[in-house]
C-alpha cells in the first residue's frame, strides 16, 4: 500500500480541496487532458498506429517508412517519400493482404491538405472536423499539439521559476542581513526590466527553442514568489520550534528543509496555479506577436494570429478553436488555483493562542 | 560547595536601532547590560524581572541563539560564546532549553515522537530502535503515554505540549536546562503540574535549572537562589529565604509587594510600584531604577550602583543599591 503519511495540516487541506467540487473536477479534467495530450501522436497523426502488411507488422508512429515499403508511388512516380497510410488503408481494405489502424484524427499538425477546390483555410467538414488553417493544416491537430506544448511549457517554466524563486526568497529570509539587502535591491532593479522587450530583443538575435524560452522567461518568472517566501521564512525562523532546533544543534540544512520550508509552502502552493495561468498566457502572447516558438510549431498564439488576419475575418472557425481552448484551459487552471487558495485559507483553522 | 556548572561573566547584548537614510544606526537597546551569574550543579536559579527587562534575551544569548556583544559564558570551564562549530555542537548536548509558548515551540508538521527524537537524530545517538525506545522512556518520564508518539502537536493540550517540550529538552541527557518562562502560558492548575514535574525530574536526574520567569510565586516554589533583573542588569541576588525575608533592593521589595496574597484581611503597608519601566533605548542616568524608586536620593541620579554583598546578610546576598544598608 501507499505508505506515505501526510502531516495533519496538509492532509486536512487536501481533504478540503477534494471537498471543493469545482476545483477537484477541474483538476481531474485538466489532468486527463494533459495525460491524453502526451499521447497526441496516437490521437492526431497521419502516420498509422499499426500496419499489418504482407505478414509484417509496422508501428510507424515514431518511425519513417517509405512508400516503396508498402508498394506505393506518388503521382510523379516517386516512392522514396513517406508512406501515405490513409491511401494504404483504403487499398488494403479493397485488395486485402493486411490492415491499417489509423489514429482517430488522421492528420498531423504540419501536413497541408490541398484536396479542396477552394484554397485554404477551408471550413470544418467530415475530413477536418475543426477545419483547416491558412496553410491547409488540420486545426484540431494543431490545437491538440498546441495544448501539449502550452501546458508543458507552462509547467516547466513554473517549475524552474518557482524553484529559483523559493530558493532565493528562503535564503533572503534565512540569511537576512547583507544578502537580503543586496539581493532585494537586485530584485527591484531586475523586476523593473520590461521582460517582454527583453524577450523580443533576444528573439531578434536567435530564434528561441522551447527550452531557451523557458530559460529566458524563467529569468523573470522567479521574482514574484521570492517576496512571499522571504517574509514566510523571516517569520517562521523566529518561532520557538526553530529556536529549539537550533538549541540542540540542528544544522542549517536540517533547519531549512525539515522545519522552515514545510511551514512556508502555503504561498508557493497557492500562487503556483496562477503562475501557470500567467505562463500559458505569456507563451500564447509571445507566439501571437511572433516572438515565441519557431514557425511550424503548433501554437495557440500563432493560431490566434492567423484568425485575426484581415483576410481571415470571415473564417470564424479559425478564431473559435484557439480562443475556446485558451479560455477552457485558463478557466480550469484558475478554478484549481482558486480552490487550492480556499483550501489553504488559514482563517479556517488558525488558532491564535 | 562544588565548582560552578555555569558561569556568566559580564555579558552584554545590545540590539542596534536603525532608521533614516541607509538604515543608519541611531542607537542601541541594551537588552543585557553586564550580567554575571553563577550556577552550581544541581541548583535552580530563578531569574525574575518585568517584561522587556532582558531575561529571555539573557537566556538566548547564553545558549548562543543570539550573538553576545561581549562577556563570557563558561560551561564547565568551556566558553560557549567562543566555541568553534564542533565544540559548540558538543556543548549543545549539555545545555537544553524549554520554551515559553507550547503552541509555537513544537513544529506542527511533525509527530510529537519525531519531535522528541530529533535531538537524538541530530547527534546520531543510537540506532533507530534505540532512539524510539528512548523516546518512549522520555514520554513516560514526563508523564505522557508512550502510545501518543504518533500523534501531532495540535492533538494535545497546552500542558501536554509543554511536557513534549520538556521531553525534547531531556532527550540528550543535558546537565543544564534553561527554562524560559515554561509555565507562564499555561493555566494555573496546569502550571502546578508542570512545575512539580520539573522538580521531580531535577531530583531524579540531577538537573541544574536556570528558571526564567516574571512570576515570583512560581520562582519561589522551585528556586534555590533568585536573581532579580531590571533593565538588563541584575539588581539583587540571593538565596530564596534571605531574598524573601529581607529584600534589600527597592525593586525587589516592590515585586514582593505586588505578589497577591490569598488573604483579604491582610493589608498592604507599602504602595505598589509607580510608572512604567523606562525605555531601555534611553535608560535613566545613575541607578536605572531611580525614577520609580520611593527611596531615591540625589546621589541615585548620578552614581551607578554596583552589585555588592549586603552587610550583615548571607554571604551570597548581593544588591545593587546605594542605600541597600539603610533600607
Image (spheres, rainbow, N blue to C red):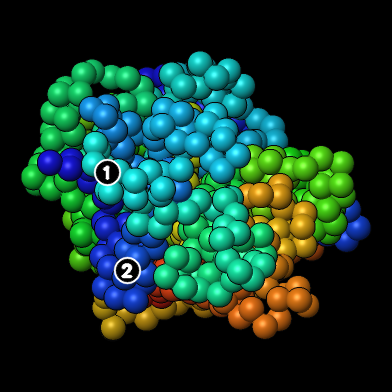
* B143 lies above or below A277: above
Task: Give the quarter of the figure containing the N terminus of chain B.
Answer: top left
Task: Give the quarter of the figure containing the C terminus of chain B.
Answer: bottom right
* A113 lies above or below B239: below
Q: Nearer the viewer, mark 2 or mark 1?
A: 1
Identified at 21% across, 58% down, the residue is B156
Report how far apart the C-alphas of labels 2 and 1 lie in the structure. 51 Å
The answer to which image quadrant residue A119 occupies is bottom right
Q: Which mark is residue A95?
A: 1
Q: Nearer the viewer, residue A17 or A83?
A: A83
> Which tag, 2 or 1, sits closer to the chain's start?
2
Identified at 45% across, 36% down, the residue is A72
Q: Nearer the viewer, residue B230 or A312?
A: A312
Question: Residue at label 2?
Answer: A24
The answer to which image quadrant residue B284 occupies is bottom right
Asked whether the residues under the numbered discs 2 and 1 touch, taking CB atoms below 8 Å apart as contact, a structural biologist would say: no
Element under label 2? helix
Element under label 1? helix
Amino acid at each position: 500500500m501507499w505508505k506515505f503519511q501526510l502531516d495533519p495540516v496538509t492532509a486536512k487541506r487536501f481533504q478540503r480541496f477534494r471537498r471543493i467540487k469545482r476545483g477537484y473536477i477541474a483538476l481531474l479534467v485538466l489532468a486527463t487532458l494533459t495525460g491524453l495530450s502526451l499521447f497526441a501522436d496516437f490521437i492526431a497523426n497521419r502516420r498509422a498506429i499499426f500496419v499489418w502488411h504482407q505478414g509484417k507488422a509496422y508501428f510507424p508512429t515514431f518511425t519513417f517508412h517509405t512508400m516503396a515499403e508498402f508498394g506505393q508511388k506518388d503521382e510523379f512516380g516517386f516512392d522514396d517519400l513517406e508512406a501515405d497510410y490513409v491511401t494504404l488503408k483504403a487499398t488494403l481494405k479493397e485488395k486485402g493482404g493486411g490492415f491499417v489502424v489509423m489514429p482517430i484524427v488522421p492528420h498531423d499538425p504540419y501536413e497541408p491538405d490541398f484536396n479542396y477546390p477552394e484554397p485554404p483555410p477551408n471550413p470544418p467538414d467530415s475530413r477536418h472536423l475543426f477545419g483547416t488553417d491558412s496553410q491547409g493544416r488540420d486545426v484540431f491537430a494543431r490545437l491538440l499539439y498546441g495544448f501539449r506544448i502550452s501546458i508543458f511549457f507552462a509547467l516547466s517554466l513554473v517549475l524552474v521559476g518557482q524553484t529559483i524563486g523559493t530558493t532565493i526568497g528562503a535564503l533572503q529570509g534565512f540569511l537576512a542581513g547583507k544578502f537580503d539587502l543586496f539581493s532585494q535591491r537586485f530584485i527591484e532593479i531586475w523586476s523593473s526590466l520590461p521582460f517582454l522587450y527583453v524577450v523580443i530583443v533576444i528573439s531578434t538575435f536567435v530564434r528561441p527553442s522551447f527550452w531557451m524560452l523557458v530559460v529566458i522567461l524563467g529569468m523573470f518568472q522567479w521574482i514574484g514568489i521570492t517576496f512571499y517566501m522571504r517574509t514566510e521564512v523571516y517569520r517562521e525562523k523566529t518561532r520557538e520550534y526553530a529556536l529549539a532546533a537550533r538549541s540542540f544543534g540542528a544544522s542549517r540544512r536540517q533547519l531549512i528543509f525539515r522545519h522552515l520550508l514545510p511551514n512556508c509552502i502555503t504561498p508557493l502552493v497557492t500562487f503556483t496555479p496562477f503562475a501557470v495561468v500567467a505562463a500559458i498566457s505569456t507563451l500564447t502572447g509571445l507566439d501571437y506577436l511572433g516572438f515565441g516558438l519557431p514557425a511550424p510549431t503548433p501554437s495557440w498564439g500563432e493560431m490566434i494570429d492567423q484568425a485575426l488576419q484581415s483576410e481571415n475575418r470571415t473564417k470564424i472557425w479559425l478564431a473559435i478553436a484557439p480562443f475556446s481552448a485558451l479560455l477552457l484551459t485558463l478557466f480550469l487552471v484558475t478554478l484549481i488555483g482558486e480552490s487550492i487558495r480556499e483550501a489553504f485559507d488559514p482563517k479556517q483553522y488558525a488558532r491564535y493562542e | 560547595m562544588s565548582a560552578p556548572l555555569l558561569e556568566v561573566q559580564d555579558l552584554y547584548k545590545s540590539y542596534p536601532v536603525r532608521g533614516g537614510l541607509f538604515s543608519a544606526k541611531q542607537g542601541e537597546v541594551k537588552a543585557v547590560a553586564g550580567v554575571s551569574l553563577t550556577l552550581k550543579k544541581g541548583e535552580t536559579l530563578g531569574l525574575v524581572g518585568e517584561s522587556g527587562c532582558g531575561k529571555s534575551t539573557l537566556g538566548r544569548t547564553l545558549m548562543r541563539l543570539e550573538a553576545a556583544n561581549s562577556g563570557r559564558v563558561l560551561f564547565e570551564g568551556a566558553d560557549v560564546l567562543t566555541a568553534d562549530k564542533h565544540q559548540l555542537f558538543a556543548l549543545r548536548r549539555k545545555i537544553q532549553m524549554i520554551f515559553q509558548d507550547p503552541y509555537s515551540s513544537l513544529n506542527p508538521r511533525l509527530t510529537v515522537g519525531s519531535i522528541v527524537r530529533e535531538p537524538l537524530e541530530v547527534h546520531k545517538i543510537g540506532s533507530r530502535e534505540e532512539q524510539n525506545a528512548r523516546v518512549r522512556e522520555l514520554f513516560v518520564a514526563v508523564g505522557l503515554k508512550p502510545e501518543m508518539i504518533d500523534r501531532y502537536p495540535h492533538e494535545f493540550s497546552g500542558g501536554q505540549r509543554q511536557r513534549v517540550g520538556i521531553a525534547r529538552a531531556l532527550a540528550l541527557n543535558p546537565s543544564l536546562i534553561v527554562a524560559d518562562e515554561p509555565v507562564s502560558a499555561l493555566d494555573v492548575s496546569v502550571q502546578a503540574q508542570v512545575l512539580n514535574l520539573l522538580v521531580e525530574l531535577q531530583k531524579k536526574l540531577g538537573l541544574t535549572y536556570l528558571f526564567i520567569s516574571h512570576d515570583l510565586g512560581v520562582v519561589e516554589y522551585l528556586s534555590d537562589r533568585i536573581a532579580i533583573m531590571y533593565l538588563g542588569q541584575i539588581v539583587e541576588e540571593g538565596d530564596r529565604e534571605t531574598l524573601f525575608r529581607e529584600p534589600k533592593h527597592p525593586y525587589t521589595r516592590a515585586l514582593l509587594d505586588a505578589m497577591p496574597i490569598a488573604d483579604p484581611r491582610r493589608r498592604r503597608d507599602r504602595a505598589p510600584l509607580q510608572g512604567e519601566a523606562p525605555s531601555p533605548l534611553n535608560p535613566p542616568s545613575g541607578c536605572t531604577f531611580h525614577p520609580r524608586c520611593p527611596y531615591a536620593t540625589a546621589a541615585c541620579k548620578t552614581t551607578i550602583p554596583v552589585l555588592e554583598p549586603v552587610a550583615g546578610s548571607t554571604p551570597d546576598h548581593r544588591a545593587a543599591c546605594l542605600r541597600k544598608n539603610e533600607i
